[in-house]
């Protein structure tokens, strides 16, 4: 297990190194000089020169790359040009919205998908199954930001149960914070719940066909007992993988959902930075998102190997 | 005959037709402003109502279908065009350095969700439909590479491939003459699914302003316009939303149906 973990960790490091290089190069190929790109056409030569040295543009590219990566390793993402504040601070503030939102959505998705998937699998081919599967087809087809607008129309504008947007902040209490994130989380969770329910159902159906399930039935367990004691536990392996992968999709998806609800998360930060041409912030947020995907994949692989020893042997 | 396939194909054809017809005819000029008739609810004159500039929503949806379909189709083309050869190559050189590089490269691209690629491209080159195509296209490459490699690996073990090797065919020729036709079904099904995901992605990117720019009509941008109007003119949000949902639903049903039709073995195994 340790050997496997080390090997995966090494490939995690390589992925991060290559990803950071890709991001750096893409930002570097931005047509023209980043400093004049940021300041626009009417920039004074002195301002331009000052910004260039502030951005480290007078250094060579490899030097700049190493400085950028070295800074990030120490938690320093550089200084935002437009806001004049450390990027680390800005991102830190926004993470308090985006990460709870993604986790909340993940929680909702699991809470809905598990019972739905288990129910559909246990009613295979019958009306209940067809109903659940039809609902998931629809769930996958609905754009989450459109669903978010409809939720606002119903629950904020007509029923007035929730505010239509904005975030009160966690200092107003856990409940107020969660209340503000409820509609966004529901919208974000819908397609993921539909996918997860389908995975849950097909994983369970695969397991139900296994020999050990027949053995469980043969030794006298009812279908329900066999499903809960043996079926579910084995079906969980592929389901957990999908859940892990979904977290990164939820984090990326929250970028769009935040726009619907005017939430001050990573998404708004990145769009503001794009229009303000604040490339340092864009670069850092993108790196952070990519890092989270790579990290989650790594953790999922480890969890998978811990549960299923065959995977360790194979590599 | 397969019900999913028929329903899916019917839904998809409606939107394909709408897009095609929009080239020669739309009920109104999709860009024509008519402030006097703004925010009308659906009526006989305007079956889907009008927006805040008095533009006919049905006409905009028809023209918007062009954008959605074009972006998604080209993005699938990019994904297939690059992903399939890479997958074939990796499978032909199984376990080699090339295989390893291609698969690790795939993992790397997987770490960049389409929205992140779009953000990166837009930050550097500015927003536009082309960027959406590139972002979604790049995101599709590892999907096709992975699925092609997986299917090709098992084919390489089969006897008819052995026979081809004994006959002296090169790995490249075997890949394109024997492996590719045998994975084509799988690719068609996956292509349908990626097509529907592409439509959703395009709508999302245009909604946040990273996709099609005015005056090019797009379903995602119509929804962005509708957002501030949703309390006074809900139809502005409902109509483009229904268009997206029905198109994506149609493509997904068609994908399911095609899978059942093209691969009889799965008919039993899946369900």
Image (cartoon, coloured by chain):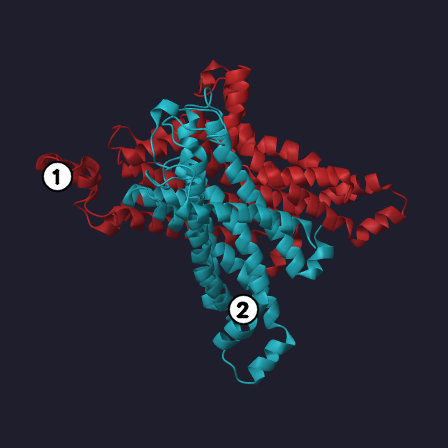
Chain colours: A red, B cyan
Q: Nearer the viewer, residue B76 or B107?
A: B76
Q: x, y percentage for residue A215?
A: 85, 51
In terms of secondary structure, where does tag 1 sit? Answer: helix
Q: Is residue A206 above or below residue B245?
A: below
Q: x, y percentage for residue A205?
A: 74, 48
> Residue visible at 12% across and 39% down?
A49
The answer, for residue B113, to whether it is visible in the render is no
Q: Which residue ends up furthest to the front in the rendered image?
A: B45
Q: x, y percentage for residue A289?
A: 42, 40
Q: Nearer the viewer, residue A138 or B179?
A: A138
> Residue visible at 46% across and 54% down?
B76
**In this rendering, would A44 be left or right of B189?**
left
Q: x, y percentage for residue B88?
A: 50, 67
**In this rendering, would A306 be left or right of A86?**
right
The residue pinned by badge 1 equals A49
> Residue visible at 49% across and 42% down?
B200
Q: Nearer the viewer, residue A232 or A74?
A: A232
Cα separation between marks 2 and 1: 56 Å
The residue pinned by badge 2 equals B180
Name the quarter where the C terminus of chain A is drawn. bottom right
**Image mark 2: chain:** B
Tell which tag, 2 or 1, sits nearer the viewer.
2
């Amino acid at each position: 297990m340790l050997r496997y973990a080390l090997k995966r960790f090494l490939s995690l490091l390589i992925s991060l190194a290559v990803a950071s290089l890709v991001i750096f190069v893409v930002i570097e190929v931005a047509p023209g000089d980043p400093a004049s790109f940021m300041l626009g056409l009417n920039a004074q030569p002195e301002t331009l020169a000052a910004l260039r040295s502030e951005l480290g543009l007078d250094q060579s590219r490899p030097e700049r790359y190493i400085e950028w990566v070295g800074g990030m390793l120490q938690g320093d993402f550089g200084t935002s040009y437009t806001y004049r504040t450390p990027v680390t601070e800005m991102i830190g503030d926004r993470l308090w919205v985006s990460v709870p939102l993604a986790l909340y959505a993940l929680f909702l998705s699991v809470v809905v998908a598990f019972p739905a998937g288990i129910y559909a699998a246990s009613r295979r081919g019958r009306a209940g199954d067809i109903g659940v599967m039809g609902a998931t087809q629809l769930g996958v087809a609905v754009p989450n930001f459109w669903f978010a607008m409809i939720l606002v129309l119903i629950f904020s504008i007509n029923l007035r149960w929730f505010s239509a947007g904005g975030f009160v902040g966690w200092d107003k209490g856990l409940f107020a914070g969660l209340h503000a994130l409820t509609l966004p989380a529901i919208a974000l969770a819908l397609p993921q719940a539909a996918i997860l329910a389908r995975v849950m159902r097909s994983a369970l159906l695969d397991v139900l066909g296994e020999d050990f399930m027949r053995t469980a039935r043969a030794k006298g367990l009812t279908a329900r007992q066999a499903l809960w004691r043996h079926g579910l536990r084995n079906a969980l392996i592929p389901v957990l993988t999908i859940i892990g992968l979904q977290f990164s999709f939820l984090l990326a998806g929250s970028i769009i959902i935040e726009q619907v609800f005017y939430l001050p998360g990573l998404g708004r930060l990145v769009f503001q930075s794009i229009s303000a041409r604040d490339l340092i912030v864009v670069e850092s947020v993108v790196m952070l998102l990519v890092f989270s995907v790579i990290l989650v994949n790594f953790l999922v692989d480890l969890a998978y190997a811990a549960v299923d020893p065959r995977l360790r042997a194979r590599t | 005959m397969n019900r999913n396939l028929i329903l899916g194909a019917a839904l998809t054809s409606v939107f394909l037709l709408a897009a095609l017809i929009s080239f020669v005819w739309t009920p109104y000029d999709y860009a024509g402003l008519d402030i006097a008739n703004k925010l009308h609810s659906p009526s006989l004159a305007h079956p889907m109502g009008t927006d805040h500039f008095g533009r006919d929503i049905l006409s905009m949806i028809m023209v918007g279908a062009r954008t959605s379909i074009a972006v998604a189709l080209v993005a699938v083309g990019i994904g297939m065009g690059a992903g399939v050869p890479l997958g074939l190559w990796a499978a032909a050189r199984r376990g080699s350095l090339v295989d390893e590089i291609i698969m690790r490269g795939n993992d790397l691209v997987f770490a960049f969700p389409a929205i992140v690629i779009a953000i990166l491209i837009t930050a550097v080159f500015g927003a536009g439909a082309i960027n959406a195509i590139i972002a979604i296209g790049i995101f599709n490459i590892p999907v096709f590479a992975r699925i092609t490699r997986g299917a090709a690996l098992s084919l390489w073990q089969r006897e008819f491939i052995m026979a081809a090797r004994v006959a002296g065919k090169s790995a490249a020729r075997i890949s394109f003459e024997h492996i590719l036709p045998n994975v084509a079904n799988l690719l068609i099904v996956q292509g349908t699914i990626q097509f529907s995901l592409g439509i959703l992605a395009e709508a999302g990117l245009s909604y946040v302003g990273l996709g099609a720019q005015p005056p090019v009509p797009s379903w995602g941008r119509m929804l962005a316009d509708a957002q501030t109007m949703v309390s006074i003119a809900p139809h502005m949000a409902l109509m483009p939303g229904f268009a997206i949902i029905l198109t994506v639903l149609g493509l997904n049903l068609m994908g399911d149906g095609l899978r059942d039709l093209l691969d009889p073995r799965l008919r039993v195994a899946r369900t």
